Each structure stands twice: as structure tokens, then as C-alpha cells.
Image: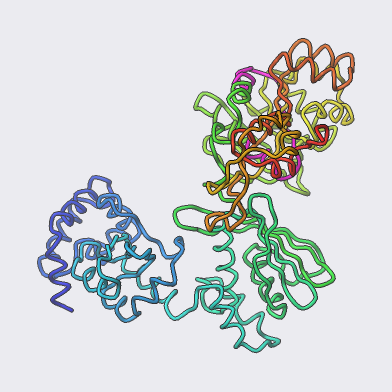
Amino acid sequence: MDGDNAAAGQQAPKPTARIGDLLVERGLISKDQLDVAFQEKSKSNKLLGELLVELGFITEQALSAVLAESSGFQRFVPGSTVVEAEALTALPKEAAQRYRAFPVAFDGKTLRLAMADIYDVIAQDKVKRFFPAGTIVQPLVCSDTEVQKAIDQYYGHELSIEGIMKELETIEAGEDEETEYVEQTEGGYLHPLVRLVNALLLDAIKSNASDIHFEPEGNFLRLRYRIDGEMTQIRTLHKRHWAAACHRIKLMGGMNIADRLNPQDGRFALEIGNRKVDFRASSLPTIHGENVVLRILDKSQALVTIDKLGYTEHNFELIKRMVKKPEGIIIVTGPTGSGKTTTLYAIMAFINSLDVNIMTLEDPVEYELALIRQAQVREGSSLTFTEGIRTLMRQDPDVILVGEVRDSGTATMALRAAMTGHQVYTTLHTNDAAGCIPRLVDLGLKPSLMAGNIVGIIAQRLVRKLCSCKEMKPATEEDCKLLQADPANPPTIGYPKGCDNCRKTGYKGRIAVSEILPFNDDVDELVLKEAPLSQIKEAAKGGGFVPIVEDATTKVLEGLTSVAAAMKSVDFTDRL
């Protein structure tokens, strides 16, 4: 082993010297400190980086970060990467410790291997012997301490959901089961129920779920995910472990574990791969126990550019025209879960720049946005939506985003901000774009104030996208009627088929269908007269208004979604 280390230490003189120079250039160590480390290296077979850490000149984390950047290899941190159980099974723990290497993932060809010394090709070759011939090793930069931590944390513990469930079957339920493990907040891989909760969270993220539902019933716990807007039952678990698992989730979310009689909210975050995933937790006492729902807030999935939301070119141009107006209010409407916040964030990213001061008031702040000042409305504090808007207006903003208009005070202040030369963006719960007008009147706004100050209203829904396995075939007679197409010459549209990629559902992902009602002089005049909504819609067509049912029809004809999926989100009853 000493020979191996010596050989490994002699194989990378150039990278070693380069690392030293880089550390000096970055100001992380001084030239004198580097000279001291080189003197020590002349008496030792250790790598220069190890000596710098031992001498206390630099931390392992800083060294790993620079080494990753200079070598071009990715960096591995034990707590922020999903580890595959198959890779751990192939490489015994003794070998991992001997070669200071930790197997992260193996896809049958490439082994992602976290190593204390990424240039130790001898260790790489010896590790490869435990894997099929032809395996390619992809080293990941990691400090020696982190490698040892990962080995101790993962080896010897079952990580798959099925394996953990079998392990749980051997555990007898007891009074002290709940307190036995929930206090183990470090690592979280000791007690099987801790590992089960983490495994379920990771499984939901891999499934692109937006929500996880833990639903206790008579003698079992039903687990459901909401994927692409549809509830999907994943599995059922024995109820005897639910109290302890619920205890664990509440502990992670910073909730009161002793209170089981009142609803609670909490929040926590996990590092998954190279991204941070936030979870919002909500518990509700029911007759069978606490019902818990976790909302998954994956910033990498949710923050998309406005051109990727699925707007038609026509509607995209309308949005670009509306956001160019220097003042006025733009309202996004739709039911809960229709992507209103995602659309607003996409618009903020579109207009965001160093010469624009954007300030937001949200409840809660779901995603942190760079260069944007975000304030959160808090229960029991003086920062309400109404007072918050008043405060924001004193902060010299160019753009104000108000998370939601819920009452008369918020609506009045938002409109007042628009009247005083600010761009204001907000959301409102209405069925369609035109329906926003009577809703605002109901909240106490006068038509004379709305006319001239509303730039436009965006109404949207999310419909499921057809998977690439879709079948393209002529539309049926019934579908032709809904699409207002000629049954004698039916268009070719997509129908769901199902494959492993989409879990046999035929759908994967969602896309926005929308209608945008831009305000012009004619619309303003009709609002002042309190004209019927049908007249307002007709007048808006001159400004580019296209009803949402027509937008949904276009996406069906383009093969993006199916008639059945569109009908679940958009009202087609007028065409029946």
C-alpha cells in the first residue's frame, strides 16, 4: 500500500505544482506558505494539497473546490448527491477505505468515483476490478475527510425503498420507537425510518413530482405523488410506523412535534446533486392521524425562461409588448397550480437588469431570484400586503410584484402604485381574463380607476404534454367537433400511448395554454361604461386577444397535447 501511495504521489507533479500556483494566485495561501509546503513535501510522499491542509494553511473544502476547477472534474460532497445502491454493492467497504474512493453511481459503463486523490490511477485500476470489464472511471474531486464520511454514512445501510421496507418488517413496534431515531438529525442514515423518509423524498424528486401526500387511513398509510398535475398512487405502507415518520418530517420542517391537534406549516431544504430543493410542509389533523403534504420547490425545474413556458408566438409577442409599458398593472389569473407564479418569475427574469429596481411582496417567497429584493408577508407582523405595498413604494422601485390580490386594500394599493408611475405585476383567482374585471369591481375598485391603468390580463392553465411515444392519427368525429374541424377531412393529432419513460401514462411534462387580454382605448371605454364581458372580449380581439379554448385547440393540432388532456383544464362545453 505504501508503494501504491508513493507511485500515486509521483504521478502528478505538474498538477501539484499547478495547484500550488493557483492557490497563491487566488490569495488562498501566500508564496511563503507554498515554499514551506514544498520543503515538507521533499521529506514526505504525501501530496502537496494534503500537506497544505495538515499545516493549516487551507481548508479541505477550499482545496477541493480549486482542484475541481483546475482539473476539470466535478466536485463531490456526500450530503449533496444521490448515491446509487448498485455502486455500493459492487465495491466492498474494505476496498473503498483502502483506496480512499467512494462509488457514487454506475450506469453499466461509467463509474462515478469520488476520490481523495483523483490522479491516483493505480487506485482507479484496482477499483475497476470490482466492476465489469470495460468500465470507465470518472473521478470526482473530494477531500479525504469527505470520502471517509461518505463511506461511514452509506455503507452497511439499506438505501432502496423496498430494502428499507423489508428491514422495517423485522422491527417490532414499541413505545420508544419514535424517539429512538428522530433526534438523529446528522446524516440521517442510521434508523431505517429516517432512511425511508429520505428515500421517499429522493424518489419523488426523481419522478418530477410537485407534491407528496402522506394520507393515513384505517390500517395503512397511502402515499401519493402529484405528477404533471395528476394525483398518482405510489404505494401503501403499514400505519404503525406513520406516527414516527410524521414525527421525523415535522422535525425536519421545524414544526412543533408535540402538537398533533392543530394544523402546522414548515419548511426545509435538501441538497440533491448540484441543486438545492426546498420543501414546504403542511400537516392537518384528521380522524386517522396527521395528514401531511409536502410541496416540492425545485428551483432548477421551476425557474424557466418565458419563451419555454409554451406560449404561442402570437401571445409571446403580446407579453413583450405589454412589459414595455413603463407604468400600469399586469394581472395573471388562474386557479391554484396553474403556473401563475412561474409565469411571473419568468417575466421578472425577462425584464431583470442592473438598471431596473424590482421589488416583490410574496406569501411565501417560493424561489430566490438574483438582483431582486424579495419581501415576505408574515402573519402577525405589520408587513401585510396593503402596508407592504406602501412600504415598497418608498424604496424607489421601478417594478413591483405583489404575490396575490386578496382583498380591497391590496387591490387599491396595487392600483395606486400603477397610477404613480410603477410597473405592477400581480395574480388574482378568476376563471378567465375578462372575469378579472368584475372581480376587481367586487373588491371595491372603480371602473374609472381601472380604465387606463390596467395594461393587460393573462389567464392561463397547464395541460399535460404528450410523451414522445404518442400516436399520431386522424382525429375521431367527436374530437373534430371539439376542434371545430371538418370530419370529412380530419386533422392528424396526437393520442397517448405509454412507455417506460412516461410511466405508461402517455404524458410527460406540462405546457401552458393561455389567453391574453391587452387593454386598448376601446376596452378602456367599455370598462368605463361597465359593458358586458362579451363586448369587452370582442373589442379586445382587435388588440390580439385569442380565447384560451382556441389556444388549447392550436396546441392539440400541433401534437403537443391531446383533446382529453386539454378538456381537463379548458372549458370546451360550448363546442359540445
Q: Quadrant of the N terminus?
A: bottom left
Q: Quadrant of residue 109?
A: bottom left
Q: Quadrant of the C terminus?
A: top right
Viewer-side residue, 350 vs 415: 350
Q: x%, y% of residue 509?
A: 59, 47
Is 337 inside the magenta-drawn segment? yes
Q: x%, y% of residue 78?
A: 42, 65
Q: Quadrant of residue 490?
A: top right
Q: Quadrant of residue 330?
A: top right
Horizontally, is 318 left or right of 134 in the view?
A: right
Image position of 127 with respect to 473: above or below: below
Task: Please state the extent of the stretch shown in magenta in the rendering.
Answer: 320-343
Is 46 inside the magenta-drawn segment? no
Viewer-side residue, 569 vs 104: 569
Q: Give me the residue at 30% from left, 70% from top.
A: 101
Horizontally, is 199 left or right of 387 in the view?
A: left
Image position of 6 with respect to 225: above or below: below
Viewer-side residue, 120 vs 384: 120
